[in-house]
Amino acid sequence: MSRLWVVVVLTSLLVTTASPIVTAQIGQPDIVQEHWYHSYATLTLDLNEWADDYPEIVILFSIGQTELGREIWMLQISDWSQEKKPDGTDKEVAYIDGGHHGNEHLGTELAFLTAEYYIEGWGDGLQEVIDILQTTELHILIMLNADGNDFDTRWNINQVDLNRNYDHYWNTCDSTQPGSSAFSESETLANSIYMNEVVSDADLYVTMHTGVWIMLYPWGKWPEQPSDWELFHHIRDDVNDNISEIPIRNANQGLYPNCGTSRDYGYGVMGFPTFTFETDDEQFLLGTVEALSDRLGEELDVMRYLVQNIWYWRARLVVTSFEITDNGIVADVSNLGHASTSNATFHYSDSSGNLLWHSENFGVNATNQSEITIGIKNLSLVGDGIWTVHYQKRVIDSSTWVEELIDESIIMINSSGKGLLPAPSLFIYFLSIITAAISRKNLSID
Ligand SMILES: [Zn+2]
């Protein structure tokens, strides 16, 4: 009798352990999670639990395997019931990764806490989170170096420093263990493929580490300020004035020269506004009473600020007046974003989108308004031409190009036709001048 009972208990224990549902519930309970770092196993359970509990906002999948075959998990977090923003434009894209260095647990947990804030905030009905997930896609890779994490070591299993293995001036500084070539490691290769194929249009990239309490912007390779220094300095001043006194510096000067990092790659090759977010290294808090979310509360506030204001982390040109005169195009161009742009042009296309003419380059500074006067050599107007402004989101060469319509209602043609090439539809053009003249006359009679 008692023997049978033992068998029943043992059997039920075995069934319990093998059941995926019960296993998922074990995960990493909040009380443990707040006082312990994730291993690859507990992270895998927690991520799956999020995907199960919040299918409307969480997409979880693997972007590849580590050198030892562990999955490299990617979370895509947004309100997936809407592909675009409520106003019909594309959502902003933020990219966040953690765990390049397997022994930097606090930085990895900051990536976890960032994901948790948005996922559980959605569950709690937090308005800030609902608004952000309707307008923004968050792509969060919490643990890149799962092998190193399991061994509590900086390196991956091939003893490579993954954050020196990126294809941006790879192995051109004094650095140890950068690998046999750029992207020689499966972890960095998978990360770079994701950057190029899925989030190439991101307006924020934050890579999380542990070391000195600091945020670093490019470059690690050079002591000079990056071409988008205005954007980085604006963020630095805003964070320091309003959120946290965390030092925010150029990486080369703020820490030490380094090459082949994901930060320099993210900015120099991908054109993202990029930060390395370093938590402090007092990370031996295992079993202490302070909860991790309190411990990293200030850092999370900085992340919330960076995500909430992502719309501003690029140039946002708005043409407010546009007049074609005998002397050329005279236009007022505002920049609502906090990044400058230096290679903008006006494009003139036919209704099928074929480019007929483009202006010379002009620049617009961050958060500024510029009056642009630009030549119209070789321009000939057609009946149904379309004016657009074509520019890069930031100054850095690698940043994305955008082409945006100029509001038709502000386009004025105030020219005798001198300087314009004759075109078959010139009749329409002169007609518009005559119409304009008549309406002016009418106005003067009133
Ligand atoms: Zn690190």
Image (spheres, rainbow, N blue to C red):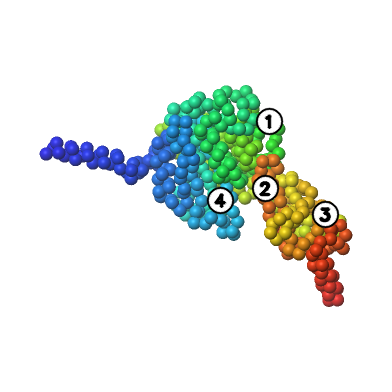
**Label 2 element class:** strand
Could you tell which of marks 2 and 4 lies nearer the N-terminus? 4
Residue 276: where, in percent of width, then height?
58, 36
Residue underneath mark 1: 222
Q: CA distance from mark 2 to mark 1?
A: 25 Å
Q: Nearer the viewer, mark 2 or mark 1?
A: 2
Q: Nearer the viewer, mark 3 or mark 1?
A: 3
Near mark 3 (Cα within 10 A), the count class, few <14, some 14-19 or many ≥20, is some
- In the image, 110 versus 78, the foreground residue is 78
**Label 3 element class:** loop
Q: Quadrant of the N terminus?
A: top left
Q: CA distance from mark 2 to mark 4?
A: 19 Å
Residue 71: where, in percent of width, then height?
45, 37
In this picture, is 104 found above or below 203? above
Image point 46% across, 35% down: which residue? Answer: 65
Q: Nearer the viewer, mark 3 or mark 4?
A: 3
Question: Is the Cβ of the residue at disc 2 closer than 8 Å to that at disc 1?
Answer: no
Residue underneath mark 3: 378
Using the rendered view, name the quadrant where residue 173 is placed. Answer: top right
Residue underneath mark 4: 136
In this picture, is 167 found above or below 174? below
Image point 88% across, 59% down: which residue? Answer: 418
Q: Quadrant of the C terminus?
A: bottom right
Circle 4: residue type: Thr
Could you tell which of marks 3 and 4 lies nearer the N-terminus? 4
Residue underneath mark 2: 401
Q: CA distance from mark 2 to mark 3?
A: 24 Å
Near mark 2 (Cα within 10 A), the count class, few <14, some 14-19 or many ≥20, is some
Give the number of marks. 4
